[in-house]
Amino acid sequence: MAFRRSIYKSRAQLEAMVEPGLITAAALAAVRAAVRPGVTTGELDAIADRVIVDRGAESNFKLVRGYRHATCISVNDQVVHGIPGSRVLQPGDLVSIDGGAQFRGWNGDSAISLVVPDPEQPALVEARSALSRVTEGSMWAGVAAMATARHLGDISAAIEDHILGAGPSALGGPYGILREYVGHGIGRKMHEAPSLFNYRTPDRGAEVKPGLVLAIEPMVTAGSDQTYVEDDDWTVTTVDGSDGSHWEHSVARHEDGIWVLTAEDGGAAGLAPFGIVPVPLA
Ligand code: MG
Ligand code: MG
């Protein structure tokens, strides 16, 4: 029987997660700065890997069985788990980059989405930017909820409410929330208990209290929430061909508040609209 580790970490363990979080943030910032028409997803992956290695860490994605890359990069109708390679980014593409670093045995995990600039297709850019904004906004709603939540279900509800309250997507219907892929605890392993749903469930879920660290990661589509896995056995793509977006932060709740481990500012900017000031761990 496997040893069951508590989902609640000590103060010292939370502090050990600060550096891998910052390295993860730096890797994604470097990728963001490099996104432009003509760059390949493989080149972006190499940039993330270089930042992680230069800071004395290793990519925790490469520790996942059968995966050889530092990031997952998913374009347009791909929502998550896209494999970096020879694909060339085009103007107007919606690209999601998911990556993480392991440093001294502790993990960070974060994802961003952005649209490759395209002055000739303003409507397309705006539709895809709106999808990304809704997804990012739902992530911050979930992060903010973690500051006061009593149970995981409170966070799930905040994420769902933000997405369903955003009104119709560019396709005219509601945004879709992936149901087969969810957020998770994070610590010594990148993926730990508990699971964090991005929608309401009948269970209120585990208690939210100091020591809990969650990777909060809504995955949202402009259409149906139905997806399939491509022939590469990794890439998760929408069945209806609608666009998908993914945002993620690793967040710690501690005795004095919350701290977004994978944000350079601890989440200060993202939490400001909620009136929440993150409290540093170290
Ligand atoms: Mg991730
Ligand atoms: Mg994750």
Image (cartoon, rainbow, N blue to C red):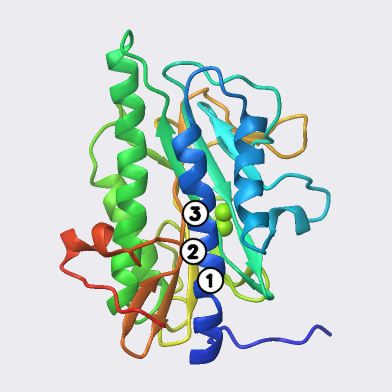
- Which quadrant contains ligand 1? bottom right
Q: Helix or strand or loop: what does disc 3 sit on?
A: helix
Contact? badges 2 and 3 (CB < 8 Å): yes
Image quadrant assignment for residue 58:
bottom right
Q: Helix or strand or loop: what does disc 2 sit on?
A: helix
Image quadrant assignment for residue 152:
bottom left
Q: Is residue 25 above or below residue 235?
A: below
Q: Residue at x 49, y 75 (%)?
A: 213
Closer to the camera, 168 or 99? 99
* Earlier-in-chain disc, 3 versus 1: 1
Q: Is mark 2 within 8 Å of ligand 1?
A: no
The numbered dot on residue 214 is none
Left/right placement of residue 31 relative to residue 156 reads right
Residue corresponding to mark 3:
26
Q: Position of residue 87 (x, y in %)?
A: 65, 22
Amino acid type at circle 3 is Ala
Inter-mark Cα distance, 2 to 3: 6 Å
Residue corresponding to mark 2:
22
Amino acid type at circle 1 is Glu
Closer to the camera, 235 or 91? 91
Q: Position of residue 242 (x, y in %)?
A: 47, 25
Q: Helix or strand or loop: what does disc 1 sit on?
A: helix
- Name the outermost residue toward the top: 120
Q: Residue at x 44, y 16 (%)?
A: 91
Q: Residue at x 51, y 66 (%)?
A: 21
Instruction: Tally the marks.
Output: 3
Residue corresponding to mark 1:
19
Quadrant holding the N terminus: bottom right
Contact? badges 2 and 1 (CB < 8 Å): yes
Inter-mark Cα distance, 3 to 1: 11 Å
Q: Is residue 56 visible?
A: yes
